[in-house]
Image (cartoon, grey):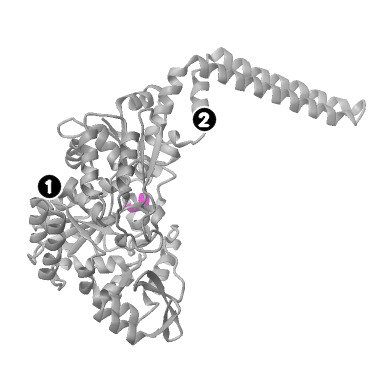
Amino acid sequence: MSAEPSSSAVTSGPAGRLKLTGVDVRRFPWIRPLAGDYAYNFTRVEGLYAGNPLEADAWREAVRRAQRQPRDRARLVDLLAAQQEHRHAPAEARAAAARLGDPATVAVVTGQQAGVFGGPMYTLLKAITALQLARRTAEKQNVPAVAIFWVEAEDHDWDEVRSCTVLDAEFQPRTVTLADLEGAGELPVAKLQLDARVEQTIQELEAALQKSEFTDGVIASMRAAWNPGRGLACAFATWIETLLGPHGLVVFESADPAAKPLAADVFARELSTPGRTAALAAEAGEALASRGHAPQVTSQPDSVSLFSLDPIRRSIRRQGDQLVVGDETHTREDLARKAIERPAAFSPNVLLRPIVQDTLFPTICYVAGPSELAYLGQLRGVYEQFGVPMPLMFPRATATLLDSGATRFLGKYGFPFEDLRTPDESALNRLLEAQLPASVEQSLRDAETQIHEAMTRVVAALPSLDPTLEGAAKTTLGKMEHELRSLHGKVIHAAKKRDETLRRQFTRAQAQAFPHGHPQERTLAVVYFLNKYGPGIVDLLLEELPIDLGHHWLITL
């Protein structure tokens, strides 16, 4: 396939309910170039990953590796069943989890931090991609396949998860923020409990949302999941399970202390060979850089890829032959023994988490975001170090949902979608200039040319009379050009006043596509789309959203 960006493709879902325009991701400066190489030039990154997800043989080999790897499936199924019982999971999700007890069953895994009120839209896109791939695997590989959503909640970065953003009735971004919970910023998110103030935040969310026929149901689902006394991570897990559990999504709370014994050997090995994981990732990072892609993770030489959770999360670092946790010094043997005896006292960092994940689950594929795809390209040697099969990596679906008015605006004026990202009015000014009568714009350009040519001749002639006048002439030229630019600005301002409709169309499309200047899927919360389009949007995306690599989908609803 050519490495040159392809033109957009317009298609529709099988029932024609979605209008879809596919745009090559290489057009977008905010998407890592790695995503383009991964989709269109896999040979440039070959060797860093387990295989090319576009090749059928790679899937067959991934299934074989996952099925052959020994793991305690019975214990895993019991663990999942206990979590699901606690959350009152839908029957379809429970049945899917039970299938993991079958040695033939494989898993497609994705995950995300436990964000307040469900997090941004890409959370849903990740889960939908995983569900679609699990269905595709079951059909094409003729094996039982389950989609897993890994809830990450052992980070203590409170600011990353405490807020969600929606558009109000005027298409203005409104951010709703949960009040600081006890221990916020110090304890892992999984240890934070919602208090009575969550009700006030839900009321703020309701006030921010444009009222629709779906608002009451959406707010009721928020209250059902996020209620006082419940852990923040459990609230997130409950909500996404309610949304996608009926489609068979298995939600896993990774911070569950009962899950840690399944990863105890991984923790112990990391502590017995401290620094080896970081060194292998650094070597792969150099290989990634040699291919023109910056490494996502740069570890310190003395870093250990585990945190201590006893009681707060603290880093572990190597100091000679000793390991240091806070102010405490331990031998490798002592901490490795503790990891076996008390695995709940440890948590993997970003480099070790995938190893833990694929030790627990028979993972054949991980659905990754752009940043994840980068650091996962640094882990092939780490997987080999721990004797865990590396799964395929599949970039999540990426999309922007627009109403018909925004789509008509883009089509009518041939306006590039990515130009909506411009945070100031420069893109709007260019559009308005293009709408000016040709005679006005040509007259301004002619005046600029003629003034510049005439004054250039004056500047050239004056030194023969008095050399000191050359500077004054240049200054005069600058003032004249400045005044002409000022006049041009006034013309644009007059055009803006004349065509307020165009201005409103631009502003509305920009607010939907790039709220606060950031891509929609990374900014607007899932709850915004559920409120606007109803719960049926989930079924629609699950059935009709393409998950082709290398395309961003503009969806008209």
Label 1 CA crowd tier, 10 Å (few <14, some 14–19, many 20+): some
Give the labeled residue for mark 2.
425
**What residue is drawn where x is 20% and y is 61%?**
364
Name the mark nearer the viewer: 1 or 2: 1
Task: Identify which amino acid the numbered label 1 is placed on.
Answer: Pro
How packed is label 2: few (under 14 Cα within 10 Å), some, or many (20 or more)? few
* Disc 1 secondary structure class: helix
Provide the major secondary structure of the magenta segment. helix
Q: Is residue 287 above or below residue 197?
A: below
Q: Position of residue 518 (x, y in %)?
A: 42, 41
Q: What numbered label is drawn on residue 541? A: none
Report the front residue among 84 and 401. Answer: 84
Q: For this rendering, which residue is in front, 315 or 410?
A: 315
Q: Give coordinates of residue 402: x percent, y percent.
A: 32, 32
Q: Position of residue 420 (x, y in %)?
A: 43, 33
**Dot label at residue 246:** 1
Q: Are marks 1 and 2 in contact (CB under 8 Å)?
A: no
| Residue 524 drawn in magenta | no
In the figure, residue 355 lies in which quadrant? bottom left
